[in-house]
Image (cartoon, helix red, strand yellow):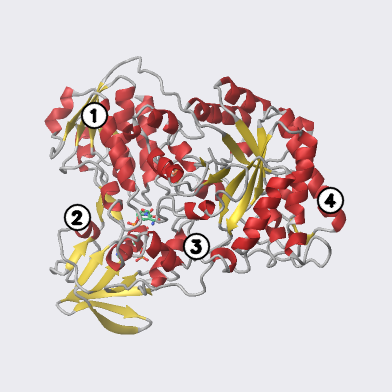
Amino acid sequence: MGSMHTGLEEEKNGFERMARYYAERAAGEAGLIVTGGIAPNRAGWVAPFGAKMSTGKEAKKHKVITDAVHAEGGHICMQILHTGRYAYHPFAVAPSKLRSPITPFTPKALSEKGIESTIQDFVNCAAYAIEAGYDGVEIMGSEGYLINQFIAAKTNQRTDHWGGSYENRTRFPLEIIRRTRERIGRGPIIIYRLSMLDLVEEGSTWEEVLQLALAVEKAGASVINTGIGWHEARIPTIATMVPRAEFTWVTKRLMGKVGIPLITTNRINNAATAEKVLADSCADMVSMARPFLADPELVKKSREGKENTVNTCIACNQSCLDHVFDRKVASCLVNPRACFETVYKEEEAKNKKKVAVVGAGPSGLTCAITLAQRGHEVSLYEKHPEIGGQFLYASRIPGKEEFRETLRYYRTMLDQWPITVHLNSEFKMNQAKDFDEVVISTGVRPRIPSIPGMDHENVVDYAQVLEGKVKIGQRVAIIGAGGIGFDMASFLGHPSMDKEEFEAFWGVTRDESVRGGLESHTLEIKNPRVLTMLKRSPGKAGKDLGKTTGWIHRETLRKLGVVQMSSVEYIKIDDKGLYIRHQGEEKCLEVAHIVICAGQESVNELAESLQSMGSKVHLIGGALKAGEIDAARAIREGYELALKL
Ligand code: NAP
Ligand code: SF4
């Protein structure tokens, strides 16, 4: 299980919560767990008062974690992470006084004395970690953090013996490994996370990576883990549109070149993919981080041949990384219990009830399954022929195919638990009397703005398009520039990409001589349509998209040549197209279709009628609140309600 900061590191009772969180993953048969990053000193904090281990007192707090993991038969290493210039606080230090493009703080350049004491802090931190019961440490040398900043000429402009030549620039990590090994002895594991593909200008060449890997082994590391891309890189490396196991070719290049095991990583989210990676000799071990948030029992279930029951990570980042970057405790969109193991109690219901769940979108499905797992008698009603709701639509967007995995998981759970499923079935008012409780999870419908000519045959809503009910023409106007507007532009603008197309589109090269693996020219994927996306409000579109993924959507649409217009007033629609007022001018966008992506409205009329009849009714998800509906909230509401009933 790969390292992932959860935010519990800084929470009240965080250590008890982490102990339970990691212990459940160990019980689920994760072979070796690596914790989220812990700073070796104050300058290395991720943010003010971030997790740090530089005293015995701080180390002691970790004992509860290592004991809990060992009690489950697991193994756990602690990651030592010094953020360098990525630190989100004024004490930031770096090899040179150069601010990163993703943080507001300019770091102080470390003096030679400062470098020596930082190395010592890494070594002390490792020794404390072993004292706290960890089986070893992972030294974070990738993703653009301090160690990486020493290695790259772009961020290390020193003229002393810590800068200049590659030998000098790599002295910092090598001294850390060498002195750590000397201090903690031969037994404990030292994993070194090596940036094998920087994906930034002036990054390392492959020859340099190989040279460093050999030196890392010699310095005393037991295992080398793969790092792909700095945080400031503008190439997606873990988001859902990255093809599965996209970057394992990078680790494969190092196979056979060093004598210690290699770990590969990034977008490996199920056992079958992991097995293939190993069978193809891409690595000796596979690391997954987010997939263990989605399902702590991923390995155990897969080993028992129950892969269909795995709740698969869809790489959305919505509740994990986006939370962490917002300084909130991480969780998982498809598994709200992740990191809240001590908060949510999944106990058998004392008072078993008959419950009707109306609407089989993510919220209703989660609710129905959790209710059944607690022993309630559940009937699920869905008016469409298929379950899935908004997830069905999302799964049709290029690059969002992973959403199908969640639908597969739900289908398996519906088969596994005693839930009576009624498809093509509208729940009738008079049926409510047969149930103790009724859950309304009827979701949302597209909001249809009132523009003259709205009933024209060329106007369609996003649901009709994604259901394949209309053949969309070559020139299209999209009304609305929220998440669905962006998805629609992607859907109409390009098909799904395979690995080769992905690399060409984003400018990743396998040419070993190219620094950072970054191609200077990217291949344009031809957009078959002329797309214009509009909104009434001023400002750039897409600023409310996910923190860690919004830039990818914005960049994708830019590359597809989608025209974006803000501060638009809609005037009317007729045979010719969409008439708008923009920058004081009236004009007609001559389009074959106008696709409405103007937000949603709750579908909850049934609830109001049932409530007036005195039924016990509960509203969740989009049916409760359509504004800013997101799947994470919908699923969490379904789960929380099911635990309460
Ligand atoms: P949204 O984000 O609220 O966007 C609605 C869009 O419609 C806005 O651009 C808005 O712009 C426009 N609009 C609202 N009322 C309108 C009206 N009466 N007439 C014309 N235009 C109107 O909603 P959404 O796009 O449906 O997405 C729903 C939720 O799912 C959001 O929380 C979204 O973040 C999430 N989502 C995210 C992603 C992603 O991250 N890729 C993908 C899909 C969905 P103006 O008011 O300026 O005209
Ligand atoms: Fe995976 Fe999304 Fe869950 Fe994060 S929130 S672990 S990316 S499914």
Please state which amino acid type lies under the numbered disc 3: Ile
Q: Is residue 502 visible?
A: yes
Q: Say if 488 sits above or below 23 in the image.
A: below
| Residue 224: percent from left, percent from top | 61, 45
Query: Could you tell which of marks 3 and 2 lies nearer the N-terminus?
Result: 3
> Residue drawn at (27%, 25%), measured in percent from left and top?
417
> Residue drawn at (63%, 56%), measured in percent from left and top?
210
Query: The C terminus is located in which quarter?
Result: top left
Callout 4: SS:
helix
Horizontal placement of 509 versus 42: left or right?
A: left
Q: Which mark is residue 116?
A: 4
| Residue 249: percent from left, percent from top | 48, 54
Callout 1: SS:
helix
Please state which amino acid type lies under the numbered disc 1: Asp
Please state which amino acid type lies under the numbered disc 4: Glu
| Residue 618: percent from left, percent from top | 30, 33
Q: Which residue is mark 1?
A: 415
Query: Could you tell which of marks 4 and 2 lies nearer the N-terminus?
Result: 4
Q: Respond yes or no on whether mark 4 lies under 8 Å from ligand 2.
A: no
Q: Say if 378 sits above or below 90 in the image.
A: above
